[in-house]
Image (cartoon, rainbow, N blue to C red):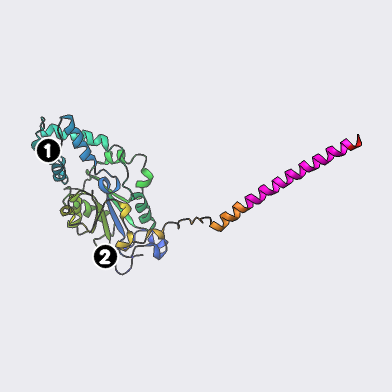
Amino acid sequence: MCSACCKSCKAPPGCSLCPPMCCSPGISYCIFDLESAVFDTRHVYKRAVIELAASYNKIIPEAVMIQSGPMETAEMAEMICRKCDLPVSWESFRFQLNERTSDLIANPTLMPGVERLVTHLGRCCMGLGLITSCSESMYCTKIRDREDFFQSFSSIICADDADLKAPKPEPDVYLIAMKRLGDAGPDCTLVFDGTPKGVQAATDARLPVVMLAEKELPCCWSELATLRLETLEEFDPTEFNIPPYSCTEPPPKKTKAPSHRSSQKSAGSQRSSAALKKAAADSEADEGEEEESEGQEVQ
């Protein structure tokens, strides 16, 4: 159960059935952004933009790519068409960009470390929420063949949710996610998001946020984040008073390295065995010669 330092939260349902050491003393709920913290789709728009620009024999300068990072698709398409002088309207470019990104994220890969973390948090009896910028039907398509993993999340907020009135950077999506998790509050809820607008939204909801940012993302865009990482493989649960992985994972098996002495003994045994075999062979040869000589004497 949560300790006294968790001021406004109750333990998640069913938590009383597990050992007290299993539960986090401070963080009892976590909310993940699907596109930037569960699936690793951070490079998708960049790849799609570069490929589309190349189809018009244009190269996008790195400065323009960095500037477009936190933009919405329409804003990004307009700026790229204007600065790179693409021979196409920004509306058409936006349509092509949406089509290309849809193809690229049809079967996205999981963020490195997310499977281990989500499994660990579930075993620690934490309530897990998920938010996504896609519709419910698209969400079902994205998680196909991974349904078992996504059953770990008890609350899912899609872009077409009836209660969602404003997208990020407004804090609505995180406020709704907290409400649906039950007793979640700013004192015991941690957010994982990889976008500047997501970090802004979580901060405005008064939530601590771990930002999963690309290495080249300017530091000024992650200033509001509580912690900045590249992937969840770098995340240390104990930094947020969450039990360490060792509480829910079996200890690694220790493999004994063969000692030099045992190796010598083994080599010695092999030599002894070879010597015995040779002696036995010589003895048999001697006996054969004796029998042959005896046969000749009898004749």
Q: Nearer the viewer, residue 234 or 117?
A: 234
Q: Quadrant of residue 292?
A: top right
- Can see residue 181? no
Please state which of residues 59 and 97 is positioned toward the viewer in this rendering: 59
- Above or below residue 48? Residue 178 is below
Left or right: residue 56 compared with residue 275:
left
Q: Is residue 294 magenta?
A: yes
* Mark toward the viewer: 2 or 1: 1
Q: Residue furthest right?
A: 298
Nearer to the camera, 232 or 149: 232
- Magenta region, residue range: 269-296
Residue 76 pos. (x, y %): 13, 40
Q: Residue at x 10, y 39 (%)?
A: 79
Q: Rate crowding at label 2 as few (under 14), some (14 to 19) or many (20 or more) other CA atoms within 10 Å.
A: few
The quarter of the rendered structure image containing the N terminus is bottom left
Q: Which mark is residue 8?
A: 2
Alpha carbon distance from label 2 to label 1: 46 Å
Quadrant of the image occupied by residue 48: top left
Residue 23 drawn at (x, y percent): 37, 62
Q: Is residue 289 visible?
A: yes
- Mark 2 touches mark 1? (CB < 8 Å): no
Residue 2: x and y in percent read 33, 65
Q: Earlier in the sequence, mark 2 or mark 1?
A: 2
Residue 253 spot, x, y in % from top left: 48, 55
Q: Amino acid at mark 2?
A: Ser
Q: What residue would you read off at disc 1?
A: 80
- Number of residues whose C-alpha sits closer than 10 Å to that of mark 1, classed few (under 14), some (14–19) or many (20 or more): many
Q: Amino acid at mark 1?
A: Ile
The image quadrant where one finds the C terminus is top right
